[in-house]
Image (cartoon, rainbow, N blue to C red):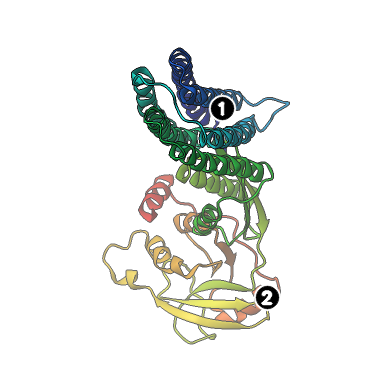
C-alpha cells in the first residue's frame, strides 16, 4: 500500500519553503557584500561569503526535493526519494566547509585591530537585520522540515539557527572592532565555527547511515511490531525492517498466521496490516507484508456439550443451543487438557436471537483456533471465520475425548459451509459483533 500522491504534496510544500529561503538568504548575502565592500567591513564581507554558502546549500535541498517529488517510473520503481538524502549529505559537506572557513577567519581576526574611526552604522543595521532574517528563516525551515520529515530542510534549519548566532557574533565583532578591542571577536567566531563543523559532520554521518539502510528508529520498529501483533489473525510478527528513503520510510515485515487460512483471507489480512501501519504513521510510504504459516505447539479448541463431565462430556447437536462448552488445550505432544468450562447463560434469557453470536463474543477472548461442532448456523459460521477460527464437524453424543482422538487421527473434516440464514441477519450480526 502506497501513499505517493500525499507524499508528493508534502514534498511540494518543502520545495516552496526551500526556494523562498534561497531567495531571502541570497538577497541578504548580496546586501552584506555590498555594504561590507562600500564601508570596508571585512567582517561583513566574510559573513556575506558564509551566507553565499548557505544559499548553495538551501538551493541544493530544493533541487533534492524537486527530484524526490518526481513520479515513479520503470527505471526508478521506488521513486527518487533518496535524492533528498544524497543532497542532505552534500549540505553537510557545505556546512563543514563553511565551518572550517569561519575557523580560519576567526583565527585571523585574533590579531586584526580595526582602524576605522567613524561609527559603522550601515554594517550594524545590515548585521542586525541578518540576525532577525536568519532566525525567521530557521523557524520556517525547521517547521517545514519536521512536518514533511525532510533531512535537508532540517539540516538547513539547524545551520540557519547557527547563522543567527553567527550574525550576533558578527554584529558584536563590528562593534568590538570599532572599539579596537582585540581577541574577543576572533575567539567567539572560532567557537561558533567549531559548532558549525560539528553540525556539518552530523549531517554527513546521518545520510551515510540512511544510504547504508541502517535502522535509525528502533522505537518505531518496536511500535509497529506491537501494533501488528494486536491485529486479529496475526499469530506472530517477524523481521520488521524499516528503510529510510529521503523524508519517507519503507516497511517490510513477515507475519505468521494459521496454515488453514485461505489465499483470499491471507491477502485481506495483509491489506489490513498495511492500512493500519500507514494510517498511524504518515511518514511511511509503503508496507510490504510477507505471510507465512505459523507452527503452533498448542491449539485452543472449544466443544459444545450437553453436560459437564470432563473428557467424557457428550457433544451437543447444535453450537448455539448447547448448555455448556468445554475449552481445550491441544498440545503437539499428543496430550490434551481442559482449560475451562463455559455455561451458556443466554439460553435462559427471553431474547434468544443470535445466541451463537453472543456466545462467540464471550469465548473469543480465549484466542480460539478450532471449534468442534455437529452443525452451526450461518451467522456464527461467518463470525468464527472472520476471526480466523477453523470449524471441524463431529458427531452428536460422542465424548470430548473421542473428538480429540478423531482429530489427532485426521478423521474430522472442516465444515465448508453453514446452515442457511438470511443475508440481513449476517450483516446485523457482524455490526453487533464489532
Q: Residue 310 appears at what percent x and percent y?
A: 50, 86
Name which residue lies at 65% across and 53% down: 291
Q: Tell which of 98 and 24 is nearer to you.
A: 98
Question: What is the secondary structure assignment of the residue under circle 2?
Answer: helix
Callout 2 crowding tier (Cα within 10 Å): few <14, some 14–19, many ≥20:
some
Give the labeled residue for mark 1.
57
- Above or below, comparing residue 409 to residue 253 in the picture: below
Name which residue lies at 60% across and 42% down: 201
Name which residue lies at 40% across and 75% down: 323
Question: What is the secondary structure assignment of the residue under circle 1?
Answer: helix
Q: Is residue 395 visible?
A: no
Name which residue lies at 39% across and 45% down: 424
Is residue 113 rendered to the left or right of residue 290? left
- Above or below, comparing residue 203 to residue 239 in the picture: above
Give the labeled residue for mark 2.
408
Q: Residue 355 appears at what percent x and percent y?
A: 37, 63
Q: Tell which of 134 and 208 is nearer to you.
A: 134
Q: Residue 246 appears at what percent x and percent y?
A: 59, 36
Labels 1 and 2: the sequence-earlier one: 1
- Location of residue 336 by image quarter: bottom right
Q: Residue 388 appears at what percent x and percent y?
A: 55, 58
- Above or below, comparing residue 311 to residue 144 in the picture: below
Asked whether the beta carbons under mark 1 and mark 2 sit within 8 Å of each other, the answer is: no
Amino acid at each position: 500500500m502506497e501513499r505517493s500522491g500525499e507524499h508528493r504534496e508534502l514534498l511540494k510544500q518543502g520545495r516552496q519553503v526551500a526556494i523562498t529561503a534561497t531567495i531571502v538568504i541570497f538577497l541578504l548575502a548580496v546586501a552584506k557584500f555590498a555594504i561590507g565592500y562600500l564601508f570596508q567591513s571585512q567582517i561583513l564581507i566574510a559573513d556575506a561569503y558564509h551566507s553565499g554558502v548557505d544559499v548553495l546549500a538551501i538551493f541544493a535541498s530544493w533541487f533534492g526535493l524537486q527530484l524526490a517529488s518526481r513520479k515513479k517510473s520503470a527505471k526508478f520503481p521506488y521513486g527518487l526519494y533518496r535524492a533528498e538524502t544524497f543532497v542532505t549529505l552534500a549540505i553537510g559537506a557545505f556546512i563543514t566547509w563553511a565551518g572550517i572557513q569561519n575557523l580560519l577567519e576567526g583565527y585571523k581576526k585574533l590579531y586584526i585591530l580595526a582602524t576605522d574611526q567613524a561609527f559603522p552604522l550601515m554594517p550594524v543595521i545590515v548585521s542586525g537585520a541578518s540576525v532577525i532574517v536568519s532566525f525567521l528563516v530557521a523557524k520556517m525551515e525547521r517547521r517545514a522540515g519536521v512536518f514533511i520529515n525532510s533531512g535537508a530542510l532540517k539540516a538547513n534549519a539547524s545551520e540557519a539557527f547557527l547563522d543567527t548566532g553567527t550574525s550576533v557574533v558578527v554584529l558584536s565583532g563590528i562593534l568590538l572592532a570599532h572599539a579596537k578591542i582585540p581577541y574577543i571577536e576572533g575567539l567567539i567566531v572560532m567557537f561558533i565555527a567549531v559548532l558549525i563543523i560539528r553540525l556539518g559532520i552530523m549531517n554527513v554521518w546521518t545520510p551515510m547511515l540512511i544510504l547504508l539502510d541502517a535502522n535509525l528508529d528502533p522505537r518505531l520498529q518496536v511500535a509497529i511490531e506491537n501494533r501488528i501483533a494486536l491485529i486479529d489473525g496475526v499469530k506472530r510478527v517477524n523481521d520488521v525492517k524499516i528503510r529510510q528513503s529521503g523524508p519517507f520510510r519503507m516497511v517490510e515485515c513477515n507475519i505468521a498466521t494459521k496454515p488453514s487460512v485461505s489465499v483470499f483471507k491471507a491477502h485481506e489480512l495483509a491489506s489490513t496490516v498495511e492500512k493500519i501501519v500507514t494510517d498511524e504513521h504518515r511518514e511511511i510510504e509503503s508496507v510490504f507484508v510477507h505471510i507465512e504459516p505459523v507452527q503452533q505447539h498448542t491449539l485452543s479448541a472449544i466443544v459444545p456439550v450437553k453436560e459437564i463431565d470432563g473428557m467424557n462430556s457428550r457433544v451437543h447437536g447444535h453450537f448455539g443451543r448447547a448448555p455448556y462448552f468445554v475449552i481445550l488445550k491441544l498440545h503437539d505432544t499428543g496430550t490434551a487438557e481442559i482449560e475451562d468450562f463455559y455455561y451458556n447463560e443466554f439460553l435462559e434469557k427471553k431474547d434468544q436471537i443470535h445466541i451463537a453470536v453472543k456466545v462467540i463474543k464471550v469465548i473469543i477472548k480465549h484466542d480460539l483456533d478450532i471449534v468442534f461442532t455437529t452443525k452451526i448456523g450461518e451467522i456464527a459460521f461467518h463470525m468464527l471465520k472472520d476471526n480466523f477460527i477453523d470449524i471441524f464437524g463431529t458427531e452428536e453424543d460422542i465424548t470430548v475425548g473421542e473428538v480429540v482422538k478423531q482429530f489427532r487421527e485426521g478423521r474430522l473434516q472442516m465444515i465448508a459451509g453453514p446452515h442457511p440464514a438470511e443475508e440481513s441477519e449476517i450483516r446485523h450480526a457482524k455490526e453487533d459483533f464489532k
